[in-house]
Image (cartoon, helix red, strand yellow):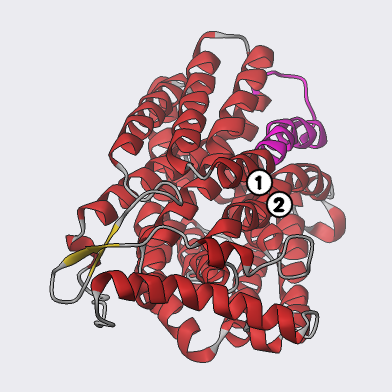
Amino acid sequence: MFVANYMDRVNLGFAQDQLRADVGLSAAAFGLGAGIFFIAYAIFEVPSNMLMERFGAKVWLTRIMISWGVVATAMAFVNSPGMFYALRFLLGVAEAGFFPAVIYYFSRWLPDSHRGRATSVFLMGSGTATVIVGPISGALLEMHGLWGHSGWQWMFFVEGVFSVVLGFVVYRYLDSGIEQATWLTDEEKAGLVTAIDAEQDARDAQRGTKARVSRWKLLADPQMLLFLWIYFAINVALYAVTFWLPSIVDDIGGLSDLQVGFLTSVPWICAIAAVYVSGRISDRIGKRRPVLMALLLIGGCGTLLAVFVSPWVGLGALCLAAVGFKPASPVFWTIPQSYLDARAAAPGIALINSIGNLGGFVAPTAFGIIEDTTGSTKGGLVGLTVVGFLAALSVLLVRGGGRNDRVRVRTSKGAAAPAPEESPGVARSVRPGTGAA
């Protein structure tokens, strides 16, 4: 699902030249259209995740997928800047809630000791998408003129229809909860439920009450504000590289659309391996913050290097940037998963994701303005370097970055109480090597 989701979100970068020529878009207008998706995403993210709690993952994730596929298909019929902006906004409305719903879904399926690798494997879907979307989109763009349609129209139509079809497959096979999983034994189901409930009971025991956690005072928590900023910075860096990488590669010169597509997949192939390795390392050492900080520093160094070298060497520098910024996201998400009370996890995760994803609006919009003003993407890359380094320094202020850290969870009365360290009994309740693990 995430492969299709990410493909329909970022394939716009490959259609840039043809779409701008046919519809009459400047670089700044294109950047605004690419980013306006995230405005809608931010507005509808929290309501969508709360509806998922009500209707269940099976129904709600299927609804999200089919509706975004329909809008993505309609992008093939864009004929004006206004229609371009409208459909990008609607795509944000349709997709809102998908990512945080899955992150919350993991928090109800796995104990903390296993979420790092699970989140990493899930986020490898976006890495896989960025690898395959280049060659696939490049091949579809070369269908230009077939039956009187432009290559970018074929690209949007084919990739959008794929998401619609996959949505019906998802409805058939997705399990909403542990109890519905026919591929787990009764013993495995009981072990998972016990482990997850034990973590929440331990939080309640530390507070001495099962007080209702306020969902509407999350922004009053300084740690939540810090989470918002760090995830915003990660997305600024990640989406800037994603949307403008094809343009940067095209600066090499003498390349076909298909060749550009293949070359843009190289940094993301490196990133997929980094996502998996970093997730396992953070789970193994139980310390998320040092891993996250190192990744952000690596990403910042990659973008800084890309400013001063030739396009070919710059491609290698962007590989380094992708290896840093892409794995930063799954490692980051293990921290708020551990910090938030289970009863506030769904809206809390959605809030972080919605505000943080505004970085996806800022990045392409700023890059477009910078390119129109200077005729180069180098200024944007310098900005990414600064953002990456500032985010790395901000990680030093984060609490809850490891299973042995004592974090505080805010209650509806404004009191804050320490959350527990992981219980050895919880870790033992899920046996490595079984379907549960």
Answer above or below: position of 347 versus 282.
below
Residue drawn at x 47%, y 43% as measured from the top left: 288
Q: SS of the residue at dot 1?
A: loop
For this view, does 42 lie left or right of residue 333? left
Residue drawn at x 36%, y 25% as measured from the top left: 386
Residue type at mark 2: give it: Trp
Considering every residue shown, the one lying at the far left of the view is 414
Residue 116: x and y, percent? 58, 52
Q: Which residues are magenta?
A: 251-274
Instruction: Quadrant for residue 220, please give it.
Output: bottom left
Numbered tag placed on residue 15 in the rendering: 1
Instruction: Please state, as top left, top right, bottom left or bottom right, where the C terminus lies in the image.
Output: bottom right
The residues tagged by marks 2 and 1 sit, at their Cα atoms, a distance apart of: 5 Å
390 is within the stretch colored magenta? no
Q: Are marks 2 and 1 in contact (CB under 8 Å)?
A: yes
Residue drawn at x 21%, y 59% as measured from the top left: 221
